Image (tube, coloured by chain):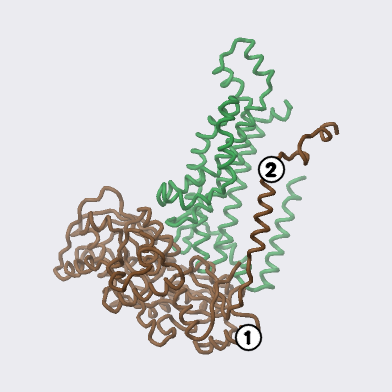
Chain colours: A green, B brown
Amino acid sequence: MKKPIGIILPILILIAWEIAAQAINNQFILPKLETVIPVLLHPTVDILGTGSLLHNALVSLERVGAGFLVALVIAIPLGVGMGWSRRLEAFADTTVQLFRPIPPLAWGPLAIAWFSVGLSSMVFIIFLGAFFPILLNTIDGVKSIKRTWVEVAQTLGATERQILGKVVLPGAAPTIWTGLRVGFGIAWMCVIAAEWLPGTTSGLGYLTLYAYNFGQMQYIIAGMISIGIIGIAFDILFRWVEDRWFAWRGLER
Amino acid sequence: MEHFITHPDPVPGMKGTHLIVLGILAVLLVAAGCTTTQQAPADVGILYTKGTGPMPTLLATKQIDGYIAWQPFVEVAPVAHIGKVITYSGSLPPDDRWKNHPCCVLAARTDIMAANPELVSDLGAATILATQYVNDHPSEGADLVADWLAGRGNFTYGNVTVSSVEVLDRAFPTVKFVNEPSEQWMAGQVEFIYALRELGAITGSLANTTDDQSRAILFDTGPYNAAMAMIGAKSFKVPNPVNAPVGVGYLLSDHDASLFVAVKKWQYFNDTYGIALRPRDLTATRPDTVDLLIAGKKVAELKLIPADAGPQLMQLAATGAIQFAYVGNPPTIAAIDKGTPVKILMALNDEGSGVVVITDSPATDWPSFVQWAKERAAAGKPIRMAAPGKGSIQDVMLRYALEESGLSVREVQA
């Protein structure tokens, strides 16, 4: 009975929100539910000339998809390499650790200078957000493969290429998948921030910032709720795949 | 437990290098704490909000007592019932000091001016024609700007809903749309150099120049004259072909109305003059790609890039991400001072900013505002005013006006 209980708190929060909004009666501090709900119920209506909620959500998803894909294509091979070869890890690990704590948005000014305004600089920032969780999980996944599995394959005469393809990658897949899930979550947060860069004209992040100029808090909160709902939806999707295909991990350990 | 007892590090789980790093950090923190000095309190605190975005919220939550902003964000306060306008920028003291003060300008990178002078004067001509149209049709101009800035949508503030068209209608008469780089206008611009020097925002090529030298560094009125000549002859030169889209930055303010109207009324300008900025997506409220048409033929593709504040645009100009900017003059002057290869070509508007205070303030005009500020300072609770950015035109005017009225000013430290 996990689900019915889980729904109680959000409902309580909504009730508390409305009571507080009525009491405060200042939409800049807390807009009333009745100003926010209509925005969410009409996701195809234009907002301040910026396009509809739905349109902006799709634009943001496109951007996050592009950045995520670039991160995946670079981080997984690099992670497998670093997990497999101690020399490569020793060579690259310090650099990775140096860059990892820099928040992706801190790269904003450089991103604009290097990739110019628009999609490519946003993709760069999203890429940075997704890259490290995928990389570190891939390294971890490859390293935590049981030595016995590799030894068995070696005894049976497998080449290194075969071991990587048939033992290491499948064995590390559940951990890599966790990295993808975490990476996507961070990428989704980064797209919102990336859309605050100058030159942006669309996206959920841009929409919330633009509404701020006019003090239109109901659009800001509707945008935040949309961001949250889309984030949850993708997390559920990733978990569903995890449960379906990688459930063996829990059994095996 | 065996492991702990024989552990070689002074602290379990922590390596020697970690401790050294922590030690250095601790020393730095202590040093920073010791060197922070207490400053004497000022009469008025100024808070910089990096654009106008946070101002309505800060005012509505009483974190500031007022703000100075560009239009239409001055009008947001009265329509939202969170503040009132006490003065528009042209009337700020000292007397007549800010009447017809320069504000937004059209600036261009020197490389495109050298490589494609026709393109520069064509864009100038399209801007000048649109300015004329705005002055001849102010209510239509306000409506088109409301369309550009807010899709003619409504703003909702609690129980109050106001049309963006109404907000722009209120804002429009407080902005003067002009293009001519006149003597008086240039003198007004040069005045800003003095203000920016005082603020420490000018330290480069304009740090020690005479007024004539400053003018030579800042302005190039050639494109304006060429544009006026083409408008007079009703014939516009076809620019050199451009391979890549030309970046045009602008501010989301009615100060840049001439750009918005040039694009929104492209059909009219195309039919009447044979020069137009036609949006690729004719249905977009804020088009981001437009084609420059001369005699109905596409001659260049322009990318329109909005920004929240002038310094962002100048950063884009410095890296070559944009070639033109519809932008405030202080950020442009500061950028040129720092070596950004940009020239100011013409004016876009004079005046167009305003001072807002919280609704329950006793101030109704500048003198009563000064009185209020003095009382609050005497009571040990100096008022806080927000300005869009340090060295912005609004910041410079507010500081001058406050100091002229005998009030000391200091930036609010977070």
- Can residue A10 be seen in the rendering of this structure? yes
Under tag 1, what secondary structure? helix
**Are there few (<14), some (14-19), or many (20+) residues within 10 Å of tag 2?**
few
Q: Which residue is mark 1?
A: B378
Q: Which of labels 1 and 2 is toward the front?
A: 2
Residue B226 falls in which quadrant of the image?
A: bottom left
Q: Measure the C-alpha gap from mark 1 to mark 2.
A: 50 Å
Quadrant position of the N terminus of chain B in the picture: top right
- Can residue B143 be seen in the rendering of this structure? no
Q: Nearer the viewer, residue B81 or B34?
A: B34
Q: Amino acid at mark 1?
A: Ala
Image position of A56 (left or right of B267): right
Q: Amino acid at mark 2?
A: His
Q: Nearer the viewer, residue B85 or B153?
A: B85
Q: Would you place residue B33 above or below residue B398 in this image?
A: above
Check the residue under mark 1 and report the chain it is in.
B
User: Which label number is shown at residue B18?
Assistant: 2
**Mark 1 vs 2, N-terminal side:** 2
Residue A238, given in percent of the width and then of the height, sits at: 61, 39
Q: Would you place residue B76 above or below residue B306 in this image?
A: below
**Are there few (<14), some (14-19), or many (20+) residues within 10 Å of tag 1?**
few
Q: Nearer the viewer, residue B245 or B328?
A: B328
* Residue at image point 64% right, 71% down: B38
Check the residue under mark 2 and report the chain it is in.
B
Residue A166 falls in which quadrant of the image?
A: top right
Q: How many marks?
A: 2
Q: Would you place residue B94 above or below residue B117 in this image?
A: below
Residue B227, given in percent of the width and then of the height, sits at: 21, 67
* Residue at image point 18% right, 57% down: B238
